[in-house]
Amino acid sequence: MHKLPDSIVISGARGRAFATILVLILLLAGALAGGYYWLQYEFYAPGPAQAPVRIQVEQGASVRGVLTQLAAQGALTNVRAVELYLRLQRRRPRVEVGMYEIPARASAAQIIELFEQGRVVLEQLTVIEGSTFADFRHGLEHHAAVTHTLANKSSAEVMAALGHAGESAEGRFFPDTYRFAAKTTDLEILALAYSSMQRLVDTAWQQRSPNLPFDTAYQALVLASIVEKETGLATERPRIAGVFVSRLRKGMRLQSDPTVIYGLGESYDGDIRTRDLVTDTPYNTYTRSGLPPTPIALPGRESVLAAMHPQENGELFFVATGAGDGAHHFSKTLEEHNAAVKEYLTRLRHQGAGAPVAHGAR
């Protein structure tokens, strides 16, 4: 039997060792590839939640902490797999503060995207046209998602906190539906509403009709608040404004019931009586000439535009028609107006109602 040379034996051993190493490398590579694809699958696969899940992310929260909380709530299956995949991708997602709603079956990828884009659940507060600043504050104070910083502060203190010390709060805030992230402060929402009204008034004042019988945008805002309270019909607002503008030109008192009601404050019980019309307050436009000292409500956009662009037809009076649609009868003369008031009261009696004071300029 011939003996193989030592060099050949050594080479054969090296070859087998190399082959073994190569197999191990291939197996390791396959395992790594398989592990990576498994992690990728875990990251993009639909989540386990059968219904939407809400989570509040606080300031300074870590990705790990948030993911762990979501796993506890049943929205994630494998937090470690998600973290490892993010590391392999060299991603360091940021998590914006706020309340999030995780959709049912959302994948980890979708959840991370929600956090990175800061798509928080938006709360909302609706401030209706014609409400007062006190109504606005009441809504803020009773909204559970608002961070309250203005408790027990007076209106003057609120305006000072907004950077507008010395301004009356009434009428300065735009009535709208405000959407905001949970824990937004009451001051931030008021600042937004103030800015919205300021932009509207400034723009409308620059484009106002010429020769209006008042000199400032603030006086126009006061008139707009009266128009807002006198009618809910958008088509009537310029005409209502026209009546009051015509009265101002002639030096007539505005004789607007809503201004009297505002002046009564908390003593107003829902009915306006003859004695109220003759009791003097700074807001009683039966006893005082000109515009009231401040707005009496938060006017909407259409009322602001109506005050800047009144429709003057020579009409000096209006009264509700009583038809139930909020419409008014407009008159140029007192005789015509008195006849319209009589018709209004007759209609109310036929409807079985009492005989309240007829609203509108008299």
Image (spheres, rainbow, N blue to C red):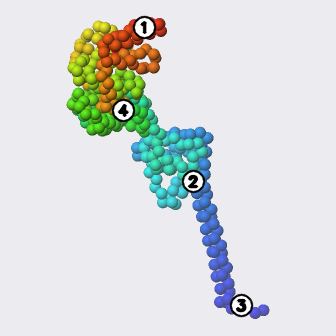
Which residue matches tag 2? Answer: 43
Task: State the residue position of label 1.
Answer: 346
Q: Given contact means CB atoms under 8 Å apart, are the residues at marks 4 and 3 in contact?
A: no
Quickly name the residue at label 3: 4
Looking at the image, tell me whether mark 1 or mark 2 is earlier in sequence order.
Answer: 2
Mark closer to the chain start, 4 or 2: 2
Q: Quadrant of the N terminus?
A: bottom right
Residue at the bottom extreme of this rendering: 2
**Residue wearing tag 4:** 301
Give whichever of discs 4 and 3 has the lower sequence position.
Answer: 3
In the rendered image, the vertical position of residue 319 relative to residue 142, given as above or below: above
Q: CA distance from mark 2 to mark 3?
A: 57 Å
Q: Amino acid at mark 1?
A: Thr
Which residue type does callout 4 highlight? Arg
Label 4 – label 3 distance at C-alpha: 103 Å
Q: Earlier in the sequence, mark 4 or mark 1?
A: 4
Residue 38 in which image quadrant:
bottom right
* Vertical relation: 250 (above or below) 204: above
Q: Secondary structure at mark 2?
A: helix
Rendered position, 181 above or below 286? below
Q: Nearer the viewer, residue 199 or 237?
A: 237
Q: Nearer the viewer, residue 111 or 124?
A: 124
